[in-house]
Amino acid sequence: MRLWLFVLFVVVPVIELAVIIQVGGLIGAWPTIGLLLASGIAGSWLMRRQGMAALLDLQRAFREFLDPTGPIAHGALILFAGALMLAPGFISDLTGLALLLPPVRRFVIRSIGSRIAVTRAGFGFPGGTMGGGADRGADGFNARRDPHRPPVVDAEFVDIEPPRPPRRDGPSAWTRP
């Protein structure tokens, strides 16, 4: 088992519970429950507001043919921040609130982005066919394709004849009797 899964599913909830018990001991049970409910409501409101702004940025990126990865990453982090703020606990609320700040999101995106390497990008069906042929490799792509030959694109086309220039040997159809 990986250590980070153990930390995520065992250590973090225990720490959250300990903090909730400590805060409850200081201010009382009902004020603690009220704070947790208020943070959940505030988190959903902030997530909706900033999520809408991220969606508008994504639409603008598509409309202006810009790279949409930034707005997508911001939107994903806003969604994650909202989930953290809806989860009961003060540490998750503070982490979610921090992720709702654009400078923090930019820092996280830069940190995670420096560890990601894109090895392949594509669109449509792998291998250029719509069916699941037997010649596919383990990664879903055509295993028999020659690496020195460009991929074959299967397409349909329609010949369009260029418009003919108007005849100049007599009156036009508009002026004929």
Image (spheres, helix red, strand yellow):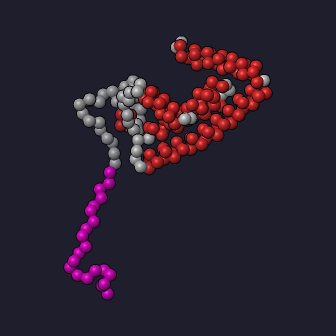
Give whichever of 81, 90 is nearer the camera.
90
Give whichever of 118, 99 is nearer the camera.
99
User: At x 27% / y 62%, what residue is drawn?
Assistant: 162
The stretch drawn in magenta includes residue 176: yes
Q: Quadrant of residue 151?
A: top left
Using the image, determine if residue 66 lies above or below residue 26: below
Q: Quadrant of residue 133?
A: top left
Give whichever of 30, 142 is nearer the camera.
30
Quadrant for the C terminus, please: bottom left
User: At x 40% / y 27%, what residue is drawn?
Assistant: 114
Residue located farthest toward the front when viewing the structure as drawn: 26
Determine if residue 76 is in view: no
**Percent position (x, y) of residue 88?**
68, 26
Q: How many marks?
A: 0
Main SS of residues in magenta: loop
Quadrant for the N terminus, please: top right
Residue located farthest toward the bottom when viewing the structure as drawn: 177
Q: Quadrant of residue 79?
A: top right
Using the image, determine if residue 149 lies above or below residue 53: above
User: At x 66% / y 20%, what residue is drawn?
Assistant: 16
**Segment tinted magenta in the rendering:** 157-177
The stretch drawn in magenta includes residue 41: no
| Residue 115 left/right relative to 154 | right
| Residue 161 left/right relative to 6 | left
Give whichever of 163, 97 is nearer the camera.
97
User: At x 24% / y 33%, what residue is drawn?
Assistant: 149
